[in-house]
Image: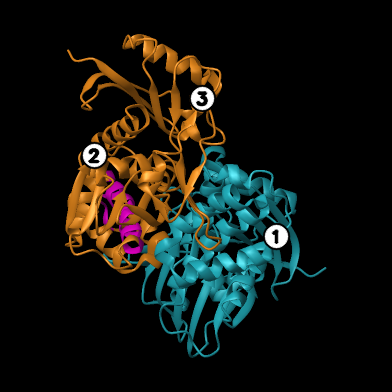
Chain colours: A cyan, B orange
Amino acid sequence: MTEPANVAVDWGTSSFRLWLVDRAGNVLAERRSGEGMLAAAKAGFAGVLRSHLAAVEAPADLPVLVCGMAGAKTGWVEAGYVDTPAPLSAVLKQAARVPGEVRDIRILPGIAQRDMKAPDVMRGEETQLLGALGLGAAGEALVCMPGTHSKWVRVKDSIVEHFATFMTGELFSVVSRETILALAVAGADEAEDIASFKAAVKAAFDAPAFAANLLFTARSRQLLFGGTPAAARATLSGTLIGTELAAGLSGSVPKAGITLIASGRLAALYRQAFDALSVNVNPIDADEAVRRGLSMAAAAIWTE
Amino acid sequence: MTEPANVAVDWGTSSFRLWLVDRAGNVLAERRSGEGMLAAAKAGFAGVLRSHLAAVEAPADLPVLVCGMAGAKTGWVEAGYVDTPAPLSAVLKQAARVPGEVRDIRILPGIAQRDMKAPDVMRGEETQLLGALGLGAAGEALVCMPGTHSKWVRVKDSIVEHFATFMTGELFSVVSRETILALAVAGADEAEDIASFKAAVKAAFDAPAFAANLLFTARSRQLLFGGTPAAARATLSGTLIGTELAAGLSGSVPKAGITLIASGRLAALYRQAFDALSVNVNPIDADEAVRRGLSMAAAAIWTE
């Protein structure tokens, strides 16, 4: 086993992921838990981190690099923002050191778009972008990063020029659980109804203003024509994702297509959505991207 | 005091309203409660109605006409639907009699749009339309009926040709309470931020695909620029209503403008929204409309 070079942590709102990595970015050990910012704010960030460091037997002098919501105002130590237009190289230069800790622990900043018409913030995605696109990439990329709060990001010559957050994942969660549509999706099993999903993506993409109506058809269709809970669930997620895609694809799309940074089930779902619209995507695994971004930043901070 | 002619009931999902009316439609007594379909399905529809009839001292032989969700499959007695294109005159001919009751109690049908691409149902709004537009009206009306589930209805020569339900009110409720945006609106007092509301209506009307992004700006703007909870709340409701209006106004708008059937705070909010877009509206009080519709139907059923 090679020597560990540093510890990398992706500390989101509701999830915590830690990797012990060597100089080449290889993963020597991994930890995943639900101790995201919300839980850690109560339990104590230092204690949560310490317990996971102990579990992977991280040497006492091994530095730790963190990205994500741990750097928010309501997180551990506020790590500030790099403002748009934001060179990705600036992200790894502005890490905030956690005070009062013997170990060298730093938190990467987020990116802020201080535009009164389109104010926006990201924390964690900038590190994924760093890992996915690298620092030297020339040319333009339009990046779709699905999630609870999906981000669409326009990057040119390694500079984040503009981005927008869509509450797609969170809307799906509350609409399918907390509204009258919960009745329509109740009992939906894990099997996807891909045909219903793609039809909903297309319908919402063609008429995004009708999103709040298309959602309701999941129930009306069941009342009038029958239909499975899985079809209703596919209509909800297809409507919300199709609406997001209508916005995300409303500007110019680079010839190379869309860069899709996602993992697991969400990656598959968005690939189907883009496929329904015949839009070309270049998929990049989100987990790998964030690890690579953290390794690049760690190398820049501690190797020089 | 004139003689009561019948009892009129608007029995919605979460509200119950009853009026004792004379032949001319004048209200002799009124009852309002939260015993809508959901509550009455548990407590028993007959018992709920009986207690309110006793409270207004309704004579034992006075007939009762009901509209709304009491006629749903999950309601008291399924009252069926009139299918689109639905003459409003058909609504008052297809009332379902409640069996097993000595008193003559009837429930008006809803309207169904059996279109696989745009399936939709209404229950209660057809009676408001009857009261607001009457039976003999020639010409075309585009009707906006705001609510938990807003309806947009195209009526031509007293025939409901097409309609669409938008979950605007319910989305506002869950988004402002159950998502991360709850933090942004927490502590908003009753005062409206009309400027923020109108700005959000316009932004969403112009770019409805961005609704899930515009919602999120309520939080980002507060993080980056400050701002009151009332402004954030106005952004949420303005975004959702502006998106609904983008869909509702996407077809042809009659020269006379939009017929807005609404009451109270919702009526004021939608008038401001239409005003922000410089769209002419003809407001009609929803409470009066449903009472008038029930009286018209009662006269047709029991006077002939």
The chain identifier of the residue carrying mark 1 reads A
Q: Which residue is mark 2?
A: B265
Name above or below for residue A281 compared with residue A194: below
How many C-alpha atoms fall within 10 Å of the one at disc 3: few (<14), some, or many (≥20)?
A: some
Q: What is the quadrant of the N terminus of chain A in the image?
A: bottom right
Q: Are marks 3 and 2 in contact (CB under 8 Å)?
A: no
The chain identifier of the residue carrying mark 3 reads B
Looking at the image, residue A264 sits to the left or right of residue A181; the answer is right
Q: Are marks 3 and 1 in contact (CB under 8 Å)?
A: no
Reading the chain from its start, which is encountered first: label 3 or label 2?
A: 3
The residue nearer to you, when weighing A236 against B302, is B302
Name above or below for residue A73 compared with residue B100: below
Q: CA distance from mark 3 to mark 1?
A: 42 Å
Instruction: Give the magenta part as a residue range.
Output: B225-247
The chain identifier of the residue carrying mark 2 reads B
Which label is found at residue B98? 3
Q: Is residue A117 magenta?
A: no
The residue nearer to you, when weighing B147 against A159, is B147
